[in-house]
Amino acid sequence: MSAVIVLAAGALTVAFAMGAAALRARQLDRVAVVDVAWGTGFVLVALVAAGLGQALGEGTTWRRWLVVAMVAAWGLRLAWHIRRRAIGEHAGAEDPRYAAMLGGSLSEVGFGTVVRRVFLVQGVAQWFVAAPVMVGAVLTASWWPAVIAGGLVWTVGWLFEVVGDRQLAAYKAQPRERRPQVLDTGLWRYTRHPNYFGDAAVWWGIWLVAGLGSGWVAALATVACPAAMTVFLVQVTGARLLEQTMMERPGYPEYAARTSMFFPLPPKAAADA
């Protein structure tokens, strides 16, 4: 019963966060607002779930707040990074991923279309992916090795995001006429999307801590959640969609031929590219 309560509360939290973000997106005429709500929404869900778990007196207290810390460190960093890039004072035009997906800007396709095709879809995905966080808030931690492994996987993913974003920022800071056509050094030598890979690793780590760490039943019931996040990052609004525009840039097809799209791998030799 406690799991049902926390899942219902999580759904209401997601609805509030995405609804507020949709209104802000209409005000700014910028669909990319949803990416800010993506990170912050998970943090809100984690806090609500932890608060309910505490109030109900169920679950393992230290593990519950460990998961909150993991989600917050990931979500708040992502939200701040996205806000500066997508809707900050010096942001450019609409994110090309959403322009390609919708066939135009928010004002061109209509608010209702954007809500149905972006905010509703991402809201449902957010609630589903966050299920291990919500369920883990009211369950007892029963398998320590999974918690430790999850912490390690989460750390790898978070570092991929932080380091990858810093390397990209340093690349963009170089004068356009002097920098290489593509960034193919550092983490970008091994994966074309270290930030998306990092996202996936973070959520597999959270599942290990909150899902598998709660036992096999909870693990099996929630394993589809990080899997869905991975599919979302690769196929829906992540790497695959971004590739459609990146392939038009000089030097990118050659880079793509030798570099793994998602999972970090050694680059292919020139003869094999």
Image (tube, grey):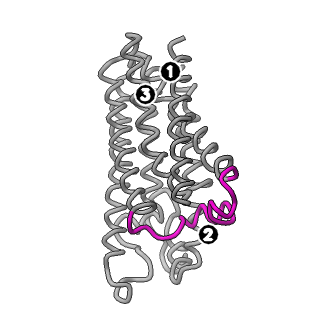
* Disc 3/disc 2 C-alpha distance (Å): 35 Å
Residue 194 location (% of width, % of height) = 43, 59
* Disc 1/disc 3 C-alpha distance (Å): 14 Å
The quarter in which the N terminus is drawn is top right
* Disc 1/disc 2 C-alpha distance (Å): 39 Å
Mark 2 closeness class: few <14, some 14–19, many ≥20 residues within 10 Å? few
Identity of the residue drawn at 55% across and 32% down: 223
Q: Nearer the viewer, residue 218 or 15?
A: 15
The quarter in which the C terminus is drawn is bottom right
Q: Are marks 3 and 2 in contact (CB under 8 Å)?
A: no
In the image, residue 53 above or below residue 107: above
Q: Is residue 128 left or right of residue 78?
A: right
In the image, residue 234 above or below residue 48: below
Q: Is residue 119 left or right of residue 45?
A: right
- Residue 210: mark: 3
Q: Secondary structure at mark 2?
A: helix
Residue at the outermost bottom position: 177
Q: Nearer the viewer, residue 238 or 20?
A: 20
Q: Nearer the viewer, residue 54 or 20?
A: 20
Identity of the residue drawn at 32% across and 35% down: 69
Residue 117 location (% of width, % of height) = 67, 50
Q: Secondary structure at mark 3?
A: helix
| Amino acid residing under circle 1 | Val
Residue 136 location (% of width, % of height) = 44, 23
The image quarter containing residue 220 is top right
| Amino acid residing under circle 3 | Ala
First of labels 1, 2 by sequence position: 1
Residue labelled with disc 2 = 244
- Residue 6: mark: 1
**Dot in front, 1 or 2:** 1
